[in-house]
Amino acid sequence: MEACNECLRLEQRLRTASEDYFNLIVQHDQMMRDGNSEASALEDTMRKARRRRNAAARLLLAHRGTHEDLSLPKKMTAGQL
């Protein structure tokens, strides 16, 4: 399947969302190891970042599904035989 411009845009959106989420996890983990009491303040931000990443993944999968639908052979009805 060849990627269209929308595929590339959605892939970049997913990549960015994943990197943001990963960076928050690393930051939270470091704060926890350092005993920083403000680490729990990141949990809501992490939850929102995870939702953005999941939404980006769903959009990309749905879009790729449209490519698959277009590439499937058309079913012939009895009248077309």
Image (spheres, grey):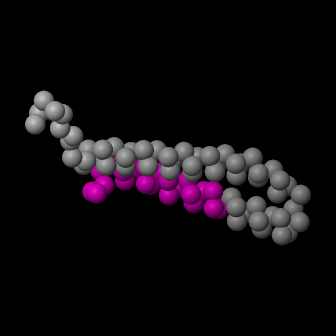
Is-magenta flag for residue 22?
yes
> What kind of secondary structure does the magenta stretch mostly adopt?
helix
Q: Nearer the viewer, residue 61 or 34?
A: 61
Q: Quick check: is 53 in the magenta stretch?
A: no
Residue 39 coordinates in the image, percent (x, y): 82, 57
Q: Residue furthest top?
A: 79
The magenta stretch spans which residues?
A: 1-23
Image quadrant where one finds the C terminus: top left
Q: Is residue 70 above or below residue 16?
A: above
Q: How many marks?
A: 0
Q: Residue at x 63, y 61 (%)?
A: 22
Pick whichever, 63 or 53, lies toward us: 63
Which residue is depicted at the point 81% across and 64% down? 31
Please tell me which residue is depicted at 57% across the width and 60% down the height of the picture. 19
Q: Say whether residue 13 is left or right of residue 1.
A: right
**Residue 28 placed where, x, y %?**
76, 61
